[in-house]
Amino acid sequence: MKVITDEKKIDELLSRGVEEVIEKEHLRKALLSGKQLRVKLGIDPTSSDLHLGHGVVLRKLKAFQDLGHKAVLVIGDFTASIGDPTGRVKARPALSAVEIKKNMKGYLKQAGKVIDVKRAEIKYNNKWLSKMKLSKMIEFSSLLGIGEVLQREDFRKRMEGIEAPRVNEILYSIMQGIDSVQLKVDVELGGNDQLLNNMMGRTLMGKLGMESQDVLTTQLLEGTDGTEKMSKSLGNYIGLNDSADEMYGKLMSIKDELIEKYLWLCTDLDKDSISGILEADGNPKNQKAWLAFEVVALYHGREAAGKAQTEFGKVFSEGETPSEVAVIKIEKNHVTLLDLVMQVDGIKSKSEARRIIGQGGVKVNGHQLMDGNRPIALESEVLVQVGKRRFAKFIKERV
């Protein structure tokens, strides 16, 4: 694919949703030169789901790809065993090789909802980091002063607290920098909380006499709670693998003050279209409907977005049951409420199920039940509603 040097598109690439560019003028000149750049994004498989927060920086990678540049997606199957310490007040529990392999199983399919995976270079950093000799790691580490590594705010806070950073966490950003050296990239992308990790590659490359990568960080997307960064561990995320109905419903639940930011970071709408939506109707509910439709259309298609919009109206405005509800057959005559909730799509653990039940978030045939041990008879069809958006019908399987 020919490299596109359209100034308007380049300026939008360097500004839309961007927090910081180092060095901006250098990168702009490189983009205008017509040379194909190697643009790296690293994602650690510390969970099985990618979400709209990941989507922000994946969409920036796609913007580079659309201009003809080479997307280099690094799956951190080695660094995931350490875990990115960014923003954490204590060490992340180590993941086993089995957990990492399980988590990354669907990553490319999810990333492929945004970027063209077939045209990208897909790299796994276990390939070089697991084989690196200790002498080589010492060689890289010797290029850095301890102050360069410990300057991170999260490390400084932990040095003053109970749990100081562990040595493997300190090595994390060095390993991320080694990825850039290994792959000889021109640009590295990340959320703005990744700036110091990304700068490590720039630092190492410069000290090795290589052309230092430029760094572009994107704005962070708050989750559905409206305050914290979107995160799987916080449960405030909207997954790229969520169904159209689930994605639409979650988007309708975001805080009103985030509507404009979501429109800007999560859709392809231009500035004039976004302004038009916000100015044409001052009702946040209607603005969210625009937002939800556009985001769902990106990941599921416009037809699915239209159906999700209709379903949302039926269930939440008219109080009806969704048109399509999963039917689950059970052999037993009686099961506990907890057992039923565990089988509803999207419930990942017993602790999550118990929490939702205890908070009054479960209805059986329209009646709120709050005792997870309560037996439920399956003599006739049982409709279970979990939260506002999840429904399932349970019936006795006839033998």
Image (cartoon, rainbow, N blue to C red):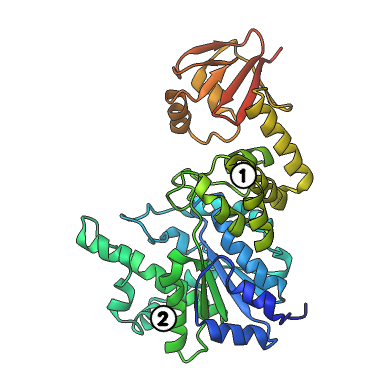
Tag nearer the camera, 1 or 2: 1
| Residue 53 percent across, percent down from the top left | 54, 55
Question: 353 and 104: which one is in front?
Answer: 353
Q: Is residue 269 visible?
A: no
Q: Position of residue 199 (x, y in %)?
A: 44, 76
Q: Amino acid at mark 1?
A: Lys
Position of residue 340 relative to residue 242, above or below, is above
Q: Tell me which amino acid carries mark 2.
A: Lys
Residue carrying label 2? 136
Residue at x 50% of width, y 89% of height: 210
Q: Secondary structure at mark 1?
A: helix
Asked if the residue under mark 2 is in contact with the one under mark 1, i.e. CB atoms within 8 Å, the reply is no
Mark 1 / mark 2, whichever is N-terminal: 2
Q: Quadrant of the N terminus?
A: bottom right
For residue 288, the mark is: 1
- Quadrant of the rendered image containing residue 253: top right
Depth check, front residue: 303 or 92: 303
Q: Quadrant of residue 18?
A: bottom right
- Crowding near the residue tagged with mark 2, few <14, some 14–19, many ≥20 C-alpha atoms within 10 Å: few
